[in-house]
Image: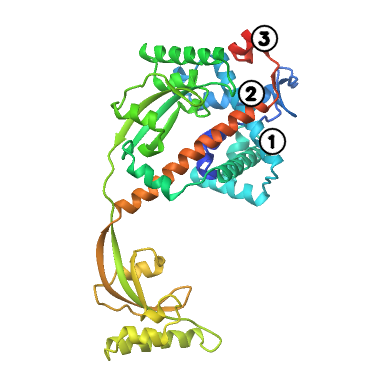
Amino acid sequence: MKHPTALLLLALAAATVLPVQAQLLPQAQGQGDATTSGTQPLDRIIAVVDDNVILQSELDDAVRSVRQQYASTPDRLPPEDVLKRQVLDRLVLMKLQVAKAGEQGIRVSNADVDQAVATVAQQNRMSPEQLQQAVEQSGQSFAAFRGQLVDQIMVQRLHENVVRDSVNITDSEINNLLNSPTYKAGEVHLAHIQISIPAGGTAADINAAEAKAQEALDAIKGGMDFNAAAIRYSDAQDALEGGDLGWRKMDEIPPAFADTITGMKPGQVSAALRGPTGFHILKLVDQREPSRQVVTEYHARQILIRPSELLTPEQAQQKAQDLYNRIVNKHEDFAKLAKENSKDPTTANAGGDMGWFQRDQWGSTIAQQLSQLKDGEVSQPFQSEAGWHIIQLEGTRKKDVTEESERNQARQAIGNRKAEQAYEDFLRQLRADAYVNILVPELKDPDARDKS
C-alpha cells in the first residue's frame, strides 16, 4: 500500500484538476518525533509569510514525503540543504495562494471535501473508509488530510479566477495561429528546468540566474540525469517531479521555444533559453506526428412520444408501438407521422429529421440503437428519460474533422498558453508583494544570504 501522503501527491492533481503551479505539499501534523523519554520536542517557526507562519514540523513532513516519493531513486534528489529550500519555497507559495484565495472570498464546503476524498480514494482503488485508515496508519490525522484537500481546492479555484479574468481568445487569434508560418503540428513530451528572475530583477539577478542555468547544463553534460538536475536546480513548481511537462501540442509552446524544439531529436537537451520569466532548459523526451481525424456521422429521423397529463406512460408506449406498426407493416411515411405525432420540438416540424450527427450527440440511449440499425431500418420503440422513441437510420458517412479539430486545438492551445503565462505572472507578483522572512539562515537562498 502506498503511503497516504504519496497517495495525495500522486492522485490529487487529477482529483481537483490543479495547475502545475499549485502542487500539493503536506501540512504540519503538529506532531514532532517522540523523544526517548516520551515527550514531544518543541516546534519552532522557520518562516513568516505575511500573517502566517511555517513550522519546522511542516517542512520536516514535506521533505519526508518527497523522500518517500523517490525512495527507489534517491540519487535523483539534491543535497539535503537544497531539497529543504526547494520544499520550503513550495510551502511559502502554497501559503500565499491559500491566503489570496481567502481574500477573494473563496470557500470550500464539507461536501466539496467529501467529493475530493471520494475521488482520491477511487483513483487509488480504495473506499473512502480504506483511505482514511491508510492515512491514520501513517501517523497523520484524517482531519489534517482533509485540511490539505481544502487548500488544494482553494488554490484550484483561485487559479480559475485568475485565468477567467485574464484570458480571452478571439477567432482572429485562432486564424493567425493556423496561418502562421511558425505554426507547427504534432505533439512533444517535454521536461524543463526553470531558473527564475525575480519580478523587477536587477542585472545582478539576471547574471546569477544565467550562471545557475549554465551550472545545471554543465551538470547534465557531465552525466547527471535531467530529472535529477531539475530537482536540484529548477525553481519551477514542478521541480520535485523532475520538471516533467508531459505531452504538449507544439502550438501550445511559445514560438521561440518551439523553433528550438523543432531542431531537436528525442533525448536531446537545449541550451539555456532566455524567456520572459527567466532561463529555461528543455529536454525533448519524445514526439509524435498528428494524424487525420475521421469520424462516422449518422443521418436519422425520430418520433418521440412523451407521457403527459393526458397520456399515461402505458398509453405513450402503446402509441409508439402503434406508430411503429404503421411505418413497418403499413408502410406509412415516417416523416409525415413524425410531423403529426412527435413531441420533440427540435425535429418534429422537419418530419423528425435529426440531420447529420456524431454517434453520441443525441445521448447514449439513441447511440446504442443506432449501432444496431442498417440504412433505412426502423427501430423498435425504446424508452429514454424523455419518453418513447422510434428511430429510422437514413444513412452513415465518414467525415474528415481534422480542420475543425485543428481549430479547437488551436483555441485550446492559445488558452493554455495564456492561462499558464497569466498564472505564472500572478504567482511571481504574489511572491514579490509578499512579506517573507526565512528565520533559519541555512534555509535562505544562497544569493539572498550573500546580499544580506
Give, as a three-letter code, the residue at label 3: Ser
User: Mark 2 or 1, which is nearer the eye?
Assistant: 1
**Figure check: 133 above or below 192:** below
Give the residue pinned by disc 1.
Answer: 99
**How many neighbours does mark 3 have within 10 angstroms: few (below 14), some (14-19), or many (20 or more)?**
few
Q: Gap between marks 1 and 3, in whole Å?
A: 28 Å
- Looking at the picture, tell me which residue is in the foreground, 54 or 125: 54
Taking the image as shown, residue 1 lies to the left or right of residue 320, namely right
Note whether residue 135 is visible: yes
Residue sitting at 62 percent across and 32 percent down? 94
Q: Gap between marks 2 and 1, in whole Å?
A: 19 Å
**Figure check: 284 above or below 108:** above
Residue 80 image point, x, y percent = 55, 15
Give the residue pinned by disc 2.
Answer: 59
Residue 151 image point, x, y percent = 64, 38
Secondary structure under tag 1 reads helix
Q: Earlier in the sequence, mark 1 or mark 3?
A: 1
Give, as a three-letter code, the residue at label 1: Ala
Give, as a three-letter code, the residue at label 2: Leu
Secondary structure under tag 2 reads helix
Give the residue pinned by disc 3.
Answer: 452
Colouring scheme, one of rainbow, by chain, secondary structure, one colour: rainbow
Q: Earlier in the sequence, mark 3 or mark 2?
A: 2
